[in-house]
Amino acid sequence: MHDHDSERLATFADVLAGELPDGWTSRHHPVGDKDDLAELTDRIWDMDLVAQALAEHPLQQAAVLTRQDGAQLVVLHRPEHGGFLIAAVAPSGLPAEAFRGLREPDGIALTDDPFHSAELVAGDLLARFDTALAQARCNAADIQPSQPDRVVLTWQPDGSLAAAPVSDTAAEVLAANGFVRDDSGTYRLSGDDTTAQARAVRAIGPQLDAHGIAVALQHPSGRIAPTATPPTPIPAPAATRASTGRGR
């Protein structure tokens, strides 16, 4: 591939990264990065447009965009059509079971205009990617996923509670009551101090309810589908389990 094409891809990806929300950086992988490109090909999270393009034209170079939280997108030339293709990169380190039954956040075609392309990515691909990413991480951690109007707290083997994904509003409430966000985007509340844990769980109920968000408790062994009957509401069950026995 000509140097002009390499420079064009690298420049486009740099500008695109700067226009996307939440802080992205770009790294160009030229033709010589054969091992990196081979690994990248295996992790491209697409079964539609981008997968078809790669089947016809093996990856020769690419630009990888990386968000502050580690999420990645890949940008590549669109052979014979002009413009570019962009797709999500599946997170590494998750077991195959985390992706089973999960629809791929298929990539999209972009024009040569990085500013317009950033609008397309932010309004389409990123939303689908974040949803799939959160679901895969929940599957890996055996955490029942939350919904926009309901936060599901899942008991973990170590006695902690976990919730993911959650809205910005719910995240603020959880963080204010001792939940800590880890690298996967999951909010966790330690069970080292069961009295403090119970107090936090009792507090988040009315706080989230004020925003129209329900709270429920779930054991990982009894996973339910998002559209099924909600798990046991809290705070009552959580308080019973974690407190010293006194009522509110």
Image (spheres, rainbow, N blue to C red):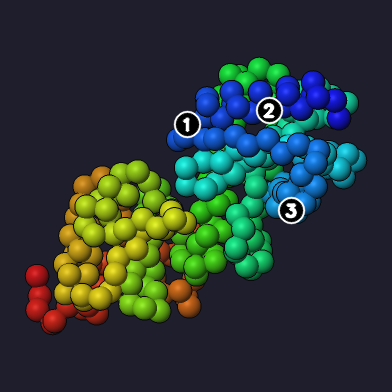
Upstream in the sequence, badge 3 or badge 2? 2
The quadrant of the picture occupied by the C terminus is: bottom left
* Residues at marks 2 and 1 touching, judged by CB atoms closer than 8 Å: no
Q: Which residue is depicted at the point 74% across and 53% down?
A: 39
Q: 226 or 27: which is nearer to us?
A: 27
Residue that badge 2 annotates: 10
Q: Amino acid at mark 2?
A: Ala
Residue that badge 3 annotates: 39
Percent x, y for residue 86? Answer: 69, 35
Taking 246 as reference, is 97 above or below it? above
Q: Amino acid at mark 3?
A: Glu
Residue 127 seen by the camera = no
Percent x, y for residue 101? Answer: 66, 61
Left/right of residue 113 with respect to residue 215 in the rendered view: right
**Residue farthest toward the front in the current orientation of the protein:** 32
Mark in the foreground, 3 or 1: 3
Crowd rating for badge 3 (residues with CA inside 10 Å; few <14, some 14–19, many 20+) = few
Left/right of residue 157 with respect to residue 107 in the rendered view: left
User: Marks 3 and 1, Cα distance to the nearest angstrom?
Assistant: 26 Å
Percent x, y for residue 192? Answer: 25, 76
Q: Which residue is depicted at the point 52% across and 25% down?
A: 19
Q: Amino acid at mark 1?
A: Pro
Left/right of residue 68 with respect to residue 75 in the rendered view: left
Residue that badge 1 annotates: 21
